[in-house]
Image (cartoon, rainbow, N blue to C red):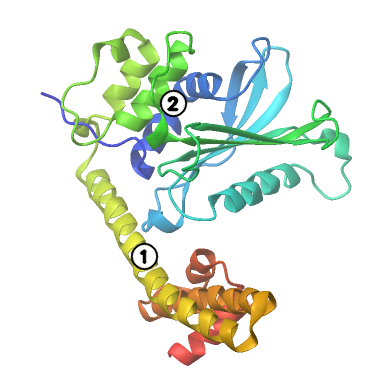
Amino acid sequence: MSKYLDPKTDIVFKKIFGQHPHLLKSFLNAVLPLPEDGLIDSLEYLSNEQAPVIPAFKYTVVDVRCTDQKGRVFIVEMQIQWTTSFKQRMLFNASKAYVNQLEKGEHYHLLKPVYGLGLINTIFEPDTNDWYHHYKIVNVKSPRTEIKDLQLIFIELPKFKTQNLREKKLQVLWLRFMSELNEKVNQVPLEWLEAPEIQEAVALAEETAYSPAELAAYDRYWDAISIEKTLVGDAYKSGQDQGIALGFERGLEQGLEQGREQGWEEGQREIKYAMARRLLAKGLSAEEVASLSELPLQVIETLKLSVE
């Protein structure tokens, strides 16, 4: 009986998709909103990252330059994330991938489109059953008019369920592989093995495919995720209690709607400040705290002095 590792972790994800371009090509063609005559024909990796020591703070990234069936070139920047502010992170990273294509003095027409693909391991849109979210730049009055150079796709893996037989079969299989495979699975469904690409990915996710050092890194990944979630949760709860009390008190003092609004804003700010102080006290770097609390780095540096 086989034992599998979760492909949503940094080390497994990169072993499958960062070292096997034909599997990444199959996956991207299945999940990206590409036209039937514009599927990826070939791709090349833009960077080779080593698995980070604390991967909870350096999110899984695979960047590739793709060429479609018509010879058109575009870039895909993909990540696996569970954290807050991932939309802003994804927009920032995809925009950076777009801008970094040009050297100084080069012409803008050389820029190629960029797709940002985020596989999200939490539910971030609780009010809808939709799990596939495609964002692009459109004219507000005429949505058919688009700027296609920058598009973002977010997939909520926990929400993914096979809806009907009309869905793209390979898309369903790849997303089932990503959302369902983990350490609790001892035997994969037979239909997964009908597709050669999925069968190969399943084999690459088997525990026996990993060295002792890689398995240790795998355990550290989940430890880091657990620690970060605990820190963020504790800091948010503590800050929320303080912030709500402060916001309510100041709102009462100022009265009416304006006072409530100002009190709420100050309360939210206090939540972030309290969260930042707790994370700094736990030994996290200023950059990590700024990213988690969404406060400017200069503010974190000032708070760090008071914590020390």
Q: Relative to the observer, which residue lies in front, 93 or 173?
A: 173
Q: Earlier in the sequence, mark 2 or mark 1?
A: 2
Whether 233 is drawn above or below 108: the answer is below
Q: Quadrant of the N terminus?
A: top left
Classify mark 2: residues with Cα within 10 Å, few (<14), some (14-19) or many (20+): few
Q: Secondary structure at mark 2?
A: loop
Q: Which residue is mark 1?
A: 233
Q: In the image, 46: left or right of 140?
A: left
Left or right, 67 with reference to 21: right
Q: Position of residue 175 (x, y in %)?
A: 41, 25
What residue appears at the point 51 percent right and 73 percent down from the top-left corner? Answer: 272
Residue 191: x and y in percent read 30, 11
Q: Give the number of the disc on residue 20.
A: 2
> What amino acid type should be assigned to the residue bearing mark 1?
Gly
Quadrant of res 113: top right
Residue 221 drawn at (x, y percent): 31, 52
Q: Disc 2 residue type? A: His
Q: Are marks 2 and 1 in contact (CB under 8 Å)?
A: no
Question: Regarding mark 1 in the picture, which secondary structure is present there?
Answer: helix
The picture quadrant where one finds residue 157 is top left
Name above or below for residue 176 compared with residue 56.
Answer: above
Q: Residue at x 40, y 42 (%)?
A: 121
**Label 2, label 1: how many angstroms apart (C-alpha)?**
37 Å
Q: In the shown orientation, is residue 232 left or right of residue 76?
A: left
Q: Which residue does the image show at 41% across and 76% down from the upper left? A: 241
Given residues 34 and 268, the one toward you in this image is: 268
Vertical order, 257 against 170 (above or below)? below
In the rendering, which numbered label is found on residue 81?
Answer: none
Mark 1 Cα-neighbour bin, 10 Å: few <14, some 14–19, many ≥20: few
x, y percent for residue 211? 22, 40
Viewer-side label of 2, 1: 1
